[in-house]
Amino acid sequence: MTSIDVQDLTKEYGSVRAVDGLTFRVLPGRVTGFLGPNGAGKSTTMRLVLGLDRPTSGTATVGGRAYASLSEPLRHVGALLDAGAAHGSRTARDHLRALAVSNRVPERRVDELLEETGLASVAGRRVKTYSLGMRQRLGIAAALLGDPPVVMLDEPSNGLDPEGIIWIRRLLRRLAGEGRTVLVSSHLMNETASFADHLVVLGRGRLLTDTRMGEFLHARVRPQVRVRTTDGAALGSLLARHRLEAARDEDGGWTVRDARVDDIGRLAFDAGLPVLELSAREATLEQAYLELTAGEAEFAAAQSPAPTQEA
């Protein structure tokens, strides 16, 4: 089984501990979202896995082996850490050809990846003329060139247009469906929620959670029901009598915490209140993530004071 295994991993830069005793495992057949505030240690951890930095202590292996010990590494691990890694004076095709030759990858694979990533029509242009989104696509093509069982991508949606974002979602799901090990770092919560099965979340270099997406959401976000009737005041009194925690919304409806749609609908029906709206508010990854990482961000904007009303 080709997994990414991080064991007691620590990395210090002088007096700064960027990674602090991390232990987690990224398994094949699913997309693992790698999350954390700026400065949490995500990029450093990925660099340690890829042998670009040496750990102060602990280990990071791929399939039980250190990345540096792999011959023809593109056949084992495909990675995108920096969309600007390709030499600007080379064409996209030449960049991929050079990588293919050094890893004994057949040249036909270059054209396959240029087509798959949407770069075939601009493959003869110099990389320095590419937009950020085009460079991202080229970096993803390079990562997939050796048809590797392990794929690691850092912010792959960065710079992509809406069509590109949909494409990368489908690509990630397909790679996992083929049984590959897929680790994706991102700051975009909605995007991560659209493709990730599992989450590894860091804060200040430490592991905060390592769990399945559904379990993470259900453990951290309380269920809510949104309900609106023709008589908002009567509904509020009804909810209060049943000791339900509810907040009045701007449009006169109510949001009820820790409730089920069936229960709220039954209460309104028994009270003779016509229901105009009744729906469950799904837990979001952003809500759960912010609750978990509160206080873990290295840099955070000060909260603006609430506006005061003039007399």
Image (spheres, rainbow, N blue to C red):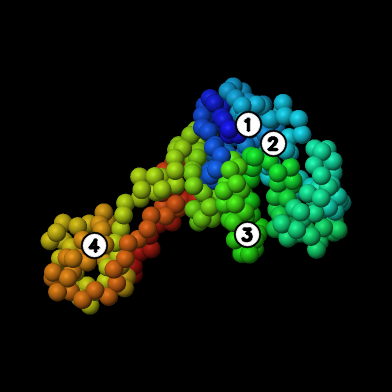
Residue 190: percent from the left, percent from the top? Answer: 50, 56
Amino acid at pointer 2: His
Q: Residue at x 17, y 70 (%)?
A: 269
Tell me which label, 1 or 3, sits earlier in the chain: 1
Cα distance in 3D space between marks 1 and 3: 27 Å
22 to 129, vertically: above or below: above
Tell me which label, 1 or 2, sits earlier in the chain: 1
Q: Are marks 2 and 4 in contact (CB under 8 Å)?
A: no
Q: Nearer the viewer, residue 240 or 194?
A: 194
Cα distance in 3D space between marks 2 and 4: 51 Å
Left or right, 1 with reference to 282: right
Can residue 238 be seen by looking at this rendering? yes
Amino acid at pointer 1: Val
Q: Nearer the viewer, residue 218 or 262?
A: 262
Q: Which residue is mark 4?
A: 262
Residue 167: percent from the left, percent from the top? Answer: 63, 59
Amino acid at pointer 3: Trp
Q: Are marks 1 and 2 in contact (CB under 8 Å)?
A: yes
Q: Which residue is mark 2?
A: 76
